[in-house]
Image (cartoon, rainbow, N blue to C red):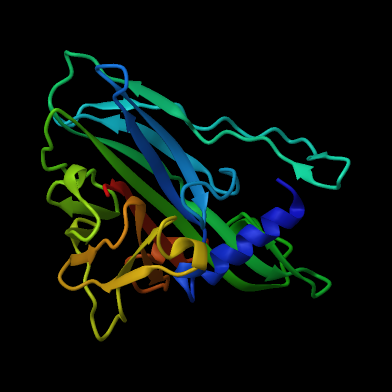
């Protein structure tokens, strides 16, 4: 990744602390094909802003990528390979070309598969980003925690960021998908495989296993929904305030939709995040759920 791209990534991630809608998102693209029985699903990783693909999966470290069956059996999928540290190729017209891996996996079905809903889950590592002044007073950033910057003159801000993503496909029939135990998680209420344009769909949102909810003393918690068929190309999304861990949308168009929720916590020496006081000042979690709406 070029220095310019890294700076842009950090700026977007940092802006998330004040405006999550402006941050890079991590999501899954999952499409099913039944032209040749019994069929297969193709899953890939989305990163950036625009669905279905916006940027190469760089600047964020990933932890796990897995297929979860209806009985909760987990199978690891291939994570994107580490990007090669090479300079972009420049065309005669002055364009720069970078190659990358989007974590594409083909999941082929068989007649022996257990019926029900299968989930694909993606989890990032704890990624640290620190904004600081160097010894000469120049503003800089580093993909490191505060305690790793020994020569910083002043720390301007520091954030820990972890992302979660989910997508689904069914075999023969839909079954209620079980939560995967993510810190921040979106779980559908109802059958996502039968949603059509104009339908209302409800979701549960949990943080550390408990319903996430808007509270006067903590601010507004909300979830967004965006699509390349509505809103996304124009830079806006649907939004719904979360109450008692519940939210829902009426999806206006067919196509791929990505739901996204952020939850921010400040680190202090006297709260539950005090063990991170030397590493960062803010902890940001994000979670996405993607699915396809039929015409």
In the rendered image, residue 79, in percent from the top left (x then y), is placed at 48, 31
- Foreground of the two, 222 or 138: 222
Q: Could you tell me which residue is drawn at 57 percent across and 30 percent down?
A: 81
Q: Is residue 150 visible?
A: yes
**Horizontal relation, residue 154 to residue 47: left or right:** right
Asked where in the image residue 140 lies, by quadrant, the reply is: bottom right
Q: Nearer the viewer, residue 56 or 147?
A: 56
| Residue 217 located left or right of residue 23 | left
Question: Percent position (x, y) of residue 145?
Answer: 57, 58
Against 94, residue 99 (above or below) is: above
The residue at the point 43 percent across, 65 percent down is 231
| Quarter holding residue 168 | top left
Q: Where is 67 relative to 1, above or below? A: above
Image position, residue 33 (x, y; %): 33, 27
The number of discs equals: 0
Is 104 or 134 nearer to us in this picture?
Answer: 104
Q: Residue furthest right?
A: 92
**Farthest bottom residue in view:** 216
Q: Is residue 280 visible?
A: no
Q: Residue at x 43, y 64 (%)?
A: 283
């Amino acid at each position: 990744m070029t220095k310019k791209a890294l700076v842009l990534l950090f700026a977007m991630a940092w802006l998330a602390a004040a405006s999550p809608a402006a941050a890079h998102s991590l999501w899954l693209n999952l499409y099913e094909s039944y032209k040749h029985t019994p069929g297969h699903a193709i899953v890939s990783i989305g990163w950036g802003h625009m669905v279905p693909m916006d940027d190469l999966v760089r600047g964020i470290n990933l932890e796990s990528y897995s297929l979860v069956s209806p009985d909760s059996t987990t199978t690891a999928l291939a994570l994107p390979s580490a990007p090669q540290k090479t300079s972009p190729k420049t065309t005669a017209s002055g364009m720069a070309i970078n190659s990358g891996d989007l974590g594409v996996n083909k999941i082929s079905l068989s007649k022996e598969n257990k019926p029900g809903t299968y989930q694909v889950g993606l989890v990032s590592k704890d990624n640290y980003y620190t904004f600081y002044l160097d010894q000469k007073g120049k503003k800089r950033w580093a993909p490191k925690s505060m305690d790793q910057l020994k020569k910083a003159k002043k720390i301007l801000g520091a954030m820990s960021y972890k992302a979660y993503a989910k997508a689904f496909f069914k075999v023969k029939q839909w079954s209620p998908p079980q939560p995967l135990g993510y810190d921040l998680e979106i779980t559908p209420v109802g059958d996502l495989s039968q949603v059509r344009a104009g339908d209302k769909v409800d979701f549960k949102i949990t943080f550390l296993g408990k319903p996430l909810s808007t509270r006067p003393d903590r601010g507004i918690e909300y979830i967004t929904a965006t699509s390349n068929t509505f809103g996304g190309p124009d830079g806006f999304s649907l939004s719904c305030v979360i109450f008692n861990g519940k939210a829902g949308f009426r999806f206006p168009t067919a196509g791929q939709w990505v739901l996204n929720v952020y939850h921010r916590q400040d680190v202090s020496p006297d709260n539950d995040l005090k063990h991170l006081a030397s590493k960062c000042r803010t902890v940001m979690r994000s979670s996405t759920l993607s699915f396809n709406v039929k015409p």
